[in-house]
Image (spheres, helix red, strand yellow):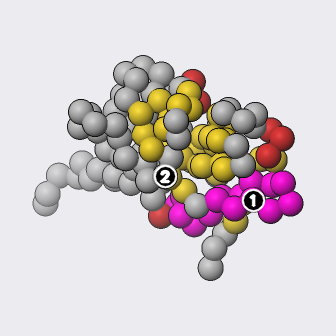
Amino acid sequence: MTDWVKLAHMDDIADGGLLAVSVQEHRLVLVRDGVVVTACQANCPHQMAKLVAGRLENGRLVCPHHLASFSLNDGKVSAGWEVADLRLYPIQITDDSILVDADAVRRNPPEGKKVTWNFAKPA
């Protein structure tokens, strides 16, 4: 079952704008391109730059630090970069409210999977 969580209203994001939001402890960015809104991870997979400081350009989110760009259709990085793809999350717009699939965010967290280190010495 999908857990839709409200993040913002359409009026909260100007056309071409970006908005930082959170789903529980997970930070995301909403990007608006006309009537299309995309939810993605908040930090660049390259050097963890805050993507909310980036810009929308021809359907791509441009990183403010190294200027690589990511497709808002599939998260693919621009040619020439050996960087992980941008994580995108399903959204729906209902009555002018922007909702994200929180289950999808939890399954594929924007920060990556948490690793628990075991420093216990073997017996």
Q: In this orientation, does residue 23 appear?
A: yes
**Residue at x 40% of width, y 23% of height:** 67
Residue farthest top in this picture? 65
Which quadrant holds residue 77? top left
- Which quarter of the rendered picture does the C terminus lie within? bottom left
Horizontal side, residue 51 vs residue 37: left or right = left
Query: Secondary structure under badge 1?
Result: strand
Indicate the position of residue 54 as horizontal and vertical percent values. Answer: 54, 26
Residue farthest bottom in this picture? 1
* Residue type pointed to by label 1: Ile
Residue farthest right in this picture? 95
Query: Secondary structure under badge 2?
Result: loop
Earlier along the polypeptide chain: callout 1 or callout 2? 2
Q: Which residue is mark 1?
A: 93
Q: Which residue is mark 2?
A: 73
Q: Which residues are magenta?
A: 91-106
User: Could you give the CA–CA distance between mark 1 and mark 2, rounded to whole angstroms?
Assistant: 17 Å
Residue 54 vertical position relative to residue 93 in the rendered view, above or below: above
Residue 24 vertical position relative to residue 63 in the rendered view, above or below: below
Horizontal side, residue 76 vs residue 34: left or right = left
Indicate the position of residue 59 as horizontal and vertical percent values. Answer: 53, 40
Which quadrant holds residue 108? bottom left
**Residue at x 66% of width, y 33% of height:** 16
